[in-house]
Image (cartoon, rainbow, N blue to C red):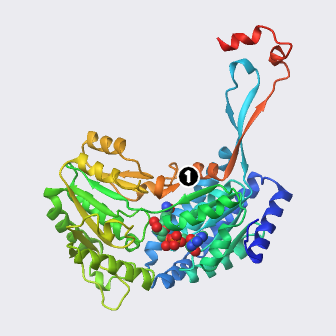
């Protein structure tokens, strides 16, 4: 093992030994663990929302309930109702020459799973992978983000109360702890965070040949097609952008729209912000930027773009001296600007005009594959063209964000936005070994293939 730090190593060893002793847990044990997680979240929702608000500075309870508590609980309930079926071996066909043998894929737990969680949705991005890993029968070590200390302390207390110490362990600490964590010889490691740190995590995992799922970030485009219903497209893009003040991995990062409709978008977005967040300066339903560092980064991105010729359109006033950034559109942007190079992760939204839908597609394809892509258009042919010609982790058509909430769809990135996926049955499989098994029949013909060789087996080659 590479250096995991004595404390982490002890925790890891306890889980590994427990798994080795008890083997794959049965359905009842897995359900008990999932119900423990459900109770942990359901019974402490208010405390959880309070802790996250303390970490962010300002985060409305409604946003935590809607974007973290609800999807976490519904993911657990989905797993509880489908687990019996997921755990069943799946029959496959044996090759003709091997009949009447039978073959199957048999799901088995991998062992000890590591999960690394970012700060932006600290509950959902812990509970989501934890649900899938527990459903698949694993034990789990979970590393919280150092930027959500109040939530991290609460989560470790709650986990210690609801789980046995050899079932789930929460590890809190800074980046050094995170590095040591990613060097443990897990049976699988799921990391959610930035693409830059994803490189480091994958390198650390490679030293122990630990398979990884990387849930990373990037710049997710929203394409407004020539036949889009503008008021609808604008409202859904604005909403997708302003939830959690844009600190969402699948928030629309920039908008591609027909050149003639830029002013219509700006006017419509101003009206939409007024409707969704009335009197934003005093509105407690608009989240603040999670840290001074992130606030300064966003201000610098915006100011640097202005210096390079971009025009800023602030869509509402925000209180002075607060870590809040106004919903802001940027026009006149180009690819030299940081705001068009880095993932924005805040309420700044550049508008990029195009002359034809093919130009919009070419723009997307000239950049790394995004985690999410949004397309708004009422012509099926336009939507199909965009779907066929671009590659993205996931897509919502005529909406934003909602593909992440579908338990029957896998969630994950592609290329620079990640590898592998989870959620629902796809998550169960990510954390299971789908073991292929060949079962020979008592009466069979394979003896015909034994030496001394006859001509029989040559028929197989015809
Ligand atoms: P981050 O990469 O800075 O940190 C994520 C986690 O990694 C934290 O727990 C941190 O302690 C840990 N970490 C930091 N350095 C590490 C190292 N060298 N080795 C191992 N672990 C290390 O990300 P963040 O700022 O917390 O989150 C924002 C990023 O996450 C954005 O890029 C966003 O798009 C992405 N994100 C992706 C998803 C997704 O589902 N794909 C979801 C949320 C956020």
Snapshot quadrant of residue 183: bottom right
Q: Do we see residue 358 in this rendering?
A: yes
Q: In what element is the residue under mark 1?
A: loop
The quadrant of the rendering that contains the C terminus is top right
Question: Is residue 311 depicted above or below 77 in this figure?
Answer: below
Question: Is residue 162 depicted above or below 132 in this figure?
Answer: below
Q: Do we see residue 122 in this rendering?
A: no
Snapshot quadrant of residue 203: bottom right
Question: Is residue 298 depicted above or below 18 in this figure?
Answer: below
- The residue under the point 42% across, 71% down is 247
Residue 113 image offset from top left, x and y in percent = 69, 61
Q: What residue is pinned by disc 1?
A: 420
The quadrant of the rendering that contains the N terminus is bottom right
Most distant residue in the top direction: 455
Image side of residue 400 versus residue 278, left or right: right
- The residue under the point 74% across, 57% down is 111
Residue 221 image offset from top left, x and y in percent = 33, 58
Of residues 62 and 145, the one drawn nearer to the viewer in this rendering: 145
Residue 120 image offset from top left, x and y in percent = 48, 72
Note whether ligand 1 is within 8 Å of mark 1.
no
């Amino acid at each position: 093992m590479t250096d995991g730090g004595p404390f982490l190593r002890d925790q890891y060893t306890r889980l590994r030994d427990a798994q080795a002793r008890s083997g794959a847990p049965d359905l009842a044990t897995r359900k008990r663990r999932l119900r423990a997680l459900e109770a942990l979240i359901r019974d402490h929702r208010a405390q959880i929302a309070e802790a996250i608000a303390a970490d962010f500075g300002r985060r409305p309870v409604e946003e935590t309930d809607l974007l973290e508590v609800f999807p976490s609980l519904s993911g657990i309930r989905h797993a509880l109702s489908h687990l019996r079926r997921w755990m069943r071996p799946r029959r496959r066909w044996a090759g003709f020459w091997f009949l009447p043998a039978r073959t199957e894929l048999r799901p088995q737990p991998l062992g000890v799973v590591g999960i690394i969680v970012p700060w932006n949705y600290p509950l959902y991005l812990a509970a989501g992978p934890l649900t899938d890993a527990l459903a698949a029968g694993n034990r789990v070590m979970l590393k919280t983000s150092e930027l959500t200390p109040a939530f991290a302390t609460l989560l470790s207390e709650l986990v210690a109360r609801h789980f046995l110490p050899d079932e789930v362990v929460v590890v809190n600490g800074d980046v050094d702890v995170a590095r040591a964590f990613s060097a443990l010889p897990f049976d699988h490691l799921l990391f959610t965070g930035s693409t830059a740190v994803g490189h480091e995590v994958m390198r650390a995992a490679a030293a122990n040949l630990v398979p990884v799922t990387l849930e990373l970030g990037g710049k997710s485009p929203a394409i407004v097609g020539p036949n889009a219903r503008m008021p609808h497209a604008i409202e859904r893009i604005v909403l997708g952008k302003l939830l959690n003040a844009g600190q969402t991995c699948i928030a629309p990062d920039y908008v591609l729209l027909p050149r003639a409709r830029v002013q219509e978008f700006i006017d419509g977005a101003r009206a939409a912000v007024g409707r969704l967040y009335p009197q934003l300066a005093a509105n407690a339903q608009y989240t603040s930027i999670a840290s001074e560092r992130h606030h300064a980064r966003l201000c610098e991105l915006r100011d640097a773009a202005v210096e390079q010729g971009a025009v800023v359109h602030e869509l509402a006033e925000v209180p002075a001296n607060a870590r809040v950034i106004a919903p802001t559109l940027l026009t006149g942007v180009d690819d030299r600007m940081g705001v068009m190079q880095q993932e924005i992760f805040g309420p700044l939204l550049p508008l990029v005009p195009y002359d034809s839908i093919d130009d919009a597609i070419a723009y997307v394809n000239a950049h790394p594959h995004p985690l999410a892509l949004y397309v708004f258009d009422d012509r099926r042919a336009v939507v199909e063209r965009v779907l066929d010609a671009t590659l993205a982790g996931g897509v919502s058509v005529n909406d934003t964000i909602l593909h992440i909430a579908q338990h029957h769809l896998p969630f994950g990135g592609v290329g620079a936005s990640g590898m592998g996926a989870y959620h629902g049955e796809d998550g169960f499989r990510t954390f299971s070994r789908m073991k292929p098994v060949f079962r020979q029949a008592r009466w069979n013909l394979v003896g015909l293939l034994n030496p001394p060789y006859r001509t029989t087996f040559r028929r197989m080659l015809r």
